[in-house]
Image (tube, rainbow, N blue to C red):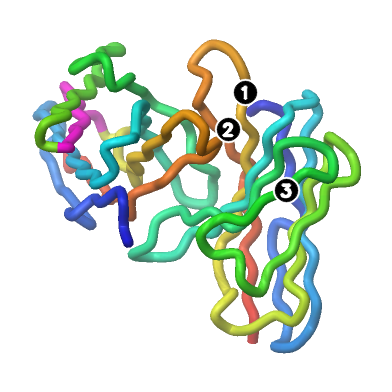
C-alpha cells in the first residue's frame, strides 16, 4: 500500500467552515498529489507537490490550498467549504524507478459539505 | 477539455468471457498510459501500463493495446472473473508534466 494514510477518513461539515485533510506517507517519496473523485468526472487533480514547500496547481485548484512542510505530510485545505466540494478525496504518491509513472493511492477521505 | 475519455460509463460481461474497456485521448504528447482498478471505499490500484513506443503489453489475464494513429487504447481481460467487477480508469502521462490525466472511469460488472 506504499505506506499512505489519510485522515480523517470521513468528515461532515457545514458550508463556510475551513477543513484540512491530511495525507501521510512513510517512505520519503518526493511527489505527492491530491485528487477528487466525482461521478462522471473520474479523478481530477487538485494540487501536487514535488518537494518540501514546492507545490503546483492541478486542473481543479480553485477553492483549495496545500502545504508541505515535511516530506511525509501533504495537507489539503478548503478555506471556506462549499457544497460543490462534497467529494471523495484521494492522496497519491509517485514512486521513482520501475514503472516510473505509477502512482499509489491512499484509501480516500469522504467529505460532505452541508 | 477532456484529454482522456472513457465513453462507456458501464459494461456488463458474463463470467469467463472477454471484457474490453476502451479509452480515447486527444493529446499526442502523451507517451505513457496506465490502467487503474478501483473497488468501492478503496483507493485506485495500478493494474497495467504501456509506453507509447509499444502497441501491446500483457500481464496475465490483462492486456493493454495502444493504437497511436487512432489515439485509442483498450484493456482486455480474459477470462473475466467476478473479482474483476470494479471501476476502471485509464490515465495518460507525458514527460515534463509530472502528472497523470485520468478518464471518467468505466464500471465493469461481471455476471456469474
What residue is shown at x 17% (from left), y 37% (from top)?
Answer: B71
Q: Position of residue A23 (x, y in %)?
A: 75, 47
Label 1 sits on residue = A95
Front position in the image: B38 or A58? A58
Q: Earlier in the sequence, mark 1 or mark 2?
A: 1
Q: Position of residue B46 (x, y in %)?
A: 45, 29
Quarter in which the N terminus of chain A is drawn: top right
Q: Is residue B111 above or below residue A102?
A: below
- The label shown at residue A55 is 3
What residue is shown at x 62% (from left), y 75% (from top)?
Answer: A112
Mark 3–mark 1 distance (CA, rounded to whole Å)? 17 Å
Q: Position of residue A19 (x, y in %)?
A: 78, 71
Q: Chain of mark 3?
A: A
Q: For the magenta stretch, what is the residue range?
A: B71-81
| Residue neighbourhood size for the residue with mark 3, other residues' Cα within 10 Å, grouped as few (<14), some (14–19), many (≥20) | some
Q: Position of residue B42 (x, y in %)?
A: 54, 45
Mark 1–mark 2 distance (CA, rounded to whole Å)? 8 Å
Mark 3–mark 2 distance (CA, rounded to whole Å)? 18 Å
Amino acid at each position: 500500500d506504499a505506506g499512505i494514510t489519510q485522515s480523517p477518513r470521513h468528515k461532515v461539515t457545514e458550508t463556510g467552515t475551513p477543513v484540512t485533510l491530511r495525507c501521510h506517507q512513510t517512505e520519503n517519496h518526493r511527489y505527492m498529489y491530491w485528487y477528487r473523485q466525482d461521478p462522471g468526472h473520474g479523478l481530477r487533480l487538485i494540487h501536487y507537490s514535488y518537494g518540501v514547500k514546492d507545490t503546483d496547481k492541478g486542473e481543479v485548484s480553485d477553492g483549495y490550498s496545500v502545504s508541505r512542510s515535511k516530506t511525509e505530510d501533504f495537507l489539503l485545505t478548503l478555506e471556506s467549504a462549499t457544497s460543490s466540494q462534497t467529494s471523495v478525496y484521494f492522496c497519491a504518491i509517485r514512486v521513482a524507478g520501475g514503472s516510473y509513472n505509477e502512482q499509489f493511492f491512499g484509501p480516500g477521505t469522504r467529505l460532505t459539505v452541508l | 477539455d477532456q484529454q482522456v475519455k472513457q465513453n462507456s460509463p458501464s459494461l456488463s460481461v458474463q463470467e469467463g468471457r472477454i471484457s474490453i474497456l476502451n479509452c480515447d485521448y486527444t493529446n499526442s504528447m502523451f507517451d505513457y498510459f496506465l490502467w487503474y482498478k478501483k473497488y468501492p471505499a478503496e483507493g485506485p490500484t495500478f493494474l497495467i501500463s504501456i509506453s507509447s513506443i509499444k502497441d501491446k503489453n500483457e500481464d496475465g489475464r490483462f492486456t493493454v493495446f495502444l493504437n497511436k494513429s487512432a489515439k485509442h487504447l483498450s484493456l482486455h481481460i480474459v477470462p473475466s472473473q467476478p473479482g474483476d467487477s470494479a471501476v476502471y480508469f485509464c490515465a495518460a502521462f507525458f514527460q515534463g508534466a509530472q502528472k497523470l490525466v485520468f478518464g471518467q472511469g468505466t464500471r465493469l460488472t461481471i455476471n456469474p
